[in-house]
Structures are given as structure tokens and as C-alpha cells.
Image (cartoon, grey):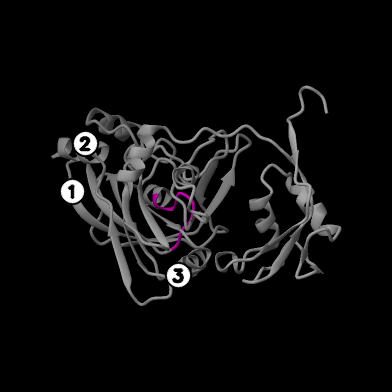
Amino acid sequence: MTDNDPPKKANSSVRLVEVTEDQDGQRVDNFLLSRLKGVPKSRIYRLLRKGEVRVNKGRVKPETRLSCGDVVRIPPVRVSERPAIAGPGVGLQKLLQQSVVYEDDRVLVINKPAGLAVHGGSGINLGLIESLRAMHPQQHFLELVHRLDRDTSGCIMLAKKRSALRWLQDEMRNHRVTKEYTALVKGRWPADRRRIDVPLRKNELKSGERIVKVSADGKASATQFSVLQRFQRATLVKARLETGRTHQIRVHSQFAGHPLAGDSKYGDEEFNLYMKQAGLERMFLHASSLKFRLPDSEQVCAVEAELPPELATPLEQLK
């Protein structure tokens, strides 16, 4: 090891780890990744390929699903000590604590502030999920149920148990979760235009930027729209997702000829300037409500997140 190499620590003994109820159904490769922090993925897959990892004394493939009560043999592995990522500052912690709109022992719903990515990556060390995990180290399981764009504020669900994650994602796949957004769009949205149903295709530029376009060979996408309030040059609308494609509301609004206020990617430059003069400094898209069944229950939970001041104030200016 050279002076420039990261220090390593050796896990010198075999570990036998019993799979808990919350880990039931998890793939063995993901199970290992969560327990061998700092170990490259290639090393973990090599351990599986060589049979050094065993489940109930038998060899397994990376995609093998674990069951509650299974015993996983984890061999000794040298783990690189990586510099700890700084946790959320006091201001962000306070903001997130004040942003909880629903919580029980299985589900957490946060009114995510705009500008905060849901997870780290692409140059972002600290997102919503990393911040919440750092704030609640005693919470052994905490995962995003769905996503919100970085510039979108509002309701986002997290699961505090693996069983709750599976339940809620299954509910979403079967269209039993209602997600509604509040958006301000350019011009006068026609009252009778209640649904946009055009396929969307996602493209990634060399820079890594994602661009979504209406395309016949894209994925089926549908959004319901209804008018909430009209202004001289804009309309406040409610958008209900039938599908959950990347940038769906933004592109469907653009396709309808009524792009979102403050949208630098799909919006109208002149309209964005007009809204900036009214005090709008961000894209006007807010995940205003969620309605879902609680895990293993017929009880319906409905939550709402009020418009943040940076959206509510420009609306007052338009009046």
C-alpha cells in the first residue's frame, strides 16, 4: 500500500447474518452492497461467483431473493475506508423536520423543498434520502418510494420498512396511488382540455442532461388537467398523473402549448421573464397531494402540502 492509497480495514472473520423481516425479498447482491460499504461492486459479484457467499450453506446467484430467516455467510473482506460525507447542516435539518406532513412506523411523507435532489449523485453528495438517514441513524431501513425532480417541491413518500416499500411500489404500479400537482402555465388553458395522452421518449445528451420529447416510439404517458384559477397571462392548473414518466407534466404542458412558468428547459423565455418580474425565481411545479392505502390496510391516507412562499407570493402579484 502506498502513501496515496486509502487505508483499509480487514473484516477478519466470517459473518453469519440472519435475514430479518424487513429484508425479506431483497436481492442478495443488494443485501451485500448495504453491508460491505466501500467494497467495489465487482468484488462483491466475484465473491458470489466464486461461491464465497452462501445462503443457508448453498451457493447463490446475484439475483437470488432472500427470505426472512435465511442465514447469509459473508466472508472476510478488506474494506476501503472512505472519507465520511458531511451530514446536513443545522438549517437543512430544521427545514426537513418542519416539512414532515405524515409519519407512522412504516411510512414517511415529506414536503420536499425545491432545489434539494432526492438522492446524491452526478456531483451531488447529499440529497434528501442521505440527509434523512443521517438525521435518523437509529432507523435501519429508509428508502424512497418514488422520485421528484430536484426543482419540484412537494409530497414525496419514503418507506421505513422493506415490506412497506414493496406494498407502496406495488400500489403505484397498479395505479392505486393518486399523485396531484399544482402548476402555473402560460396563457389560457382551455377548460375542456382535460387530458393529454401522448407517448414520451427520454434521451440523454453526451453531457448527461436528460431531454424528454413527444415521440410515437416513446412510452405511453397520460396526465389529467383541470383549471384552478385564471390570470391575465397565465393559468393555475391541477395535474393528476396517470403514468409517472420523467418530466411528464412539463412536456405534456409544452405539447399543449402552455409551458410551465419558470421552466428553463421546456418553457417559454418571454413568459419566464414576465413571471420573474412578478417574483418567480424557480419552476412553478409543486406536488400538492398524495392519496394512498396504508400498507396491509384498507385505510386510505390523504396528505397535502401547501404552496411554499416562493410560489404563493408570485401568485398574489398576478392578482
Q: Earlier in the sequence, mark 1 or mark 2?
A: 1
Give the distance between the C-alpha atoms of the residues marked 2 and 3, in whole angstroms.
Answer: 36 Å
Residue 220 on image: x %, y % = 50, 63
Tell me which amino acid carries mark 2.
Pro
Residue 65 on image: x %, y % = 67, 68
Question: Quick one: quadrant of the N terminus?
Answer: top right
Residue 248 on image: x %, y % = 44, 53
Q: In this picture, which residue range is highlighted in magenta? A: 243-249
Residue nearer the viewer, 141 or 211: 141
Query: Helix, strand or loop at disc 2?
Result: helix
Badge number at residue 230: 1
Foreground disc of the pair 1, 2:
2
Query: Helix, strand or loop at disc 3?
Result: helix
Tell me, yes or no, whether the highlighted magenta stretch contains residue 244: yes
Which residue bears the numbered disc 3? Answer: 171
Tell me which amino acid carries mark 3.
Glu
Residue nearer the viewer, 159 or 252: 159
Question: Quick one: quadrant of the C terminus?
Answer: top left
Res 240 → quadrant: bottom left
Q: Earlier in the sequence, mark 2 or mark 3?
A: 3
Tell me which amino acid carries mark 1.
Arg
Tell me if I can see residue 32 in this picture. Answer: yes
Which residue bears the numbered disc 2? Answer: 314
